[in-house]
Amino acid sequence: MKKIKVFSFVLCLALVLAGCNNTQKGAAIGTGGGALLGAIVGKIAGNTAVGAAIGGAVGAGAGALIGKKMDKAKAEAEAVQNAQVESVTDANGLQAVKVTFDSGILFQTGKADLSAAAKTSLQQFSQVLKNNTSCDVAIQGYTDNTGWKNSTAAQSAEKNKALSLDRATSVSSYLQALGVSASQIKSVEGLGEANPVADNSTAAGKEQNRRVEVYMYASKEMIQAAENGTLN
């Protein structure tokens, strides 16, 4: 019976959140005693591993202010060419923005050098980051599962992980060259073949899996400002 009640609660909550914008979701998720609720909502809304270390739950009012801020950042990012933008939930249960760049646009196969089209997109995106300096940034690189010549499956996986890190680093370095502060970029990771978003058995699926994801999430300073009611 308890499992049924929990499932019913989660299902109802998912339906409610589906009709909310980021501001409303922020208020629903950012509740003072909501550690468990935040974990449940995170599973529903696409919880990510990124998030500032704050050591406690965020209040509903602060969550709403952060949601409003993220609505604005998301709208700016949506104007960037060749970028897929969506709302996600960070490790603190707060709204964040995920921007995905296809590696087919960013890189040639097996390479980590940025293409001309990629540089144009990142030039536009760099302005979004500079307009939202209170957002922390995490950059994650991925590959498909294509093997490397004369390598075992395990060796290919390691080489793909290294390639994905090189690609994420290329994005980070170029953003910094465009004036994005190094201190704003909190992490740069290469996750290789992990977390595929499409079927690796097809060419179209492989193309989707070769990607770089950039997350914009609330910094500790943004959270403090939101809790103080001074976040604009």
Image (cartoon, rainbow, N blue to C red):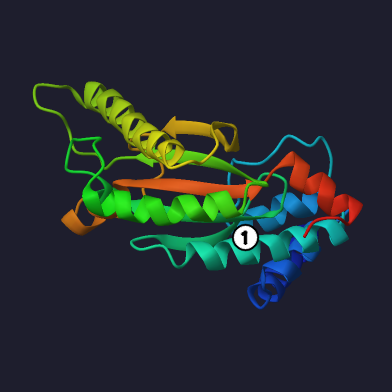
Q: Nearer the viewer, residue 123 or 227?
A: 123
Q: Quadrant of residue 155?
A: top left
Q: Quadrant of residue 109?
A: top left
Which residue bears the numbered disc 1? 44
Do we see residue 1 in this rendering?
no
Number of marks in picture:
1
Q: Quadrant of the N terminus?
A: bottom right
- Residue 183 lies, in percent from the top left, at 59, 32
Query: What's the residue at 26%, 23% (across, down)?
Result: 154
Query: What's the residue at 78%, 54% (across, down)?
Result: 37
Q: Nearer the viewer, residue 115 or 130?
A: 130
Q: Nearer the viewer, residue 91 or 145?
A: 91
Q: The disc labelled 1 sits on which kind of residue?
A: Ile
Quick one: label 1, few (<14), some, or many (20+) residues within 10 Å?
some
Query: What's the residue at 56%, 49% (across, down)?
Result: 130
Task: Tell me: residue 154, above or below residue 218.
Answer: above
